[in-house]
Amino acid sequence: MVVVRLARRGRKKNPFFHIVVTDNRMPRDGRIIEQLGYYNPVARKNDVQFQVKKDRADYWIRQGAVVSFRVRYLIRQFEKSLKKSQI
């Protein structure tokens, strides 16, 4: 089964996550099919905290990929912030 989930990168006490498409049998930081974006929970003021290729994420979801709870939450928060900035 194909899943969309977070893969941890970065250093000790300085986490950085890639949003990836992978097989669910692979380890968290194992081989990936495609990288869709990233999430930086400790971003500074001028740094971008979250970025995702929305068109590619939609493609994988249409293909039947299961999205993890945390990635689903991050995408919803990102869409809400876009709507607020457009108003």
Image: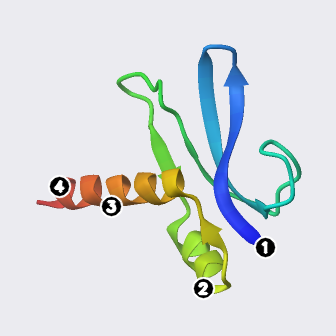
Q: CA distance from mark 1 to mark 2?
A: 14 Å
Give the label, 4 or 1, closer to the camera: 1
Q: Position of residue 46 (x, y in %)?
A: 38, 27
Residue 1's tag is: 1
Q: Amino acid at mark 1?
A: Met
Q: Position of residue 17 (x, y in %)?
A: 62, 38
Residue 79's tag is: 3
Question: Considering only order in the chain, which callout, 4 or 3, is on the residue closer to the N terminus?
Answer: 3
Residue 84's tag is: 4
* Residue nearer the viewer, 26 or 21: 26
Question: Considering only order in the chain, which callout, 3 or 1, is on the residue closer to the N terminus?
Answer: 1
Q: Are marks 3 and 2 in contact (CB under 8 Å)?
A: no
Give the label, 2 or 4, closer to the camera: 2
Colouring method of the image: rainbow
Q: Amino acid at mark 2?
A: Arg
Task: Judge the density around disc 3: few (<14), some (14-19), many (≥20) Cα neighbours within 10 Å.
Answer: few
Quarter of the image with the N terminus in it: bottom right
Q: SS class of the residue under badge 2? A: helix
Quarter of the image with the C terminus in it: bottom left
Q: CA distance from mark 1 to mark 3?
A: 26 Å
Q: Quadrant of residue 23?
A: bottom right
Give the label, 1 or 2, closer to the camera: 1
Q: CA distance from mark 3 to mark 2?
A: 19 Å
Q: Does 38 sit above or below residue 71?
A: above
Residue 62's tag is: 2
* Residue nearer the viewer, 87 or 11: 11
Q: Quadrant of residue 35?
A: bottom right
Q: Amino acid at mark 3?
A: Glu
Q: Position of residue 30 (x, y in %)?
A: 86, 46
Q: Position of residue 29 (x, y in %)?
A: 80, 42
Residue pictured at 61% horizontal, 80% vertical: 59
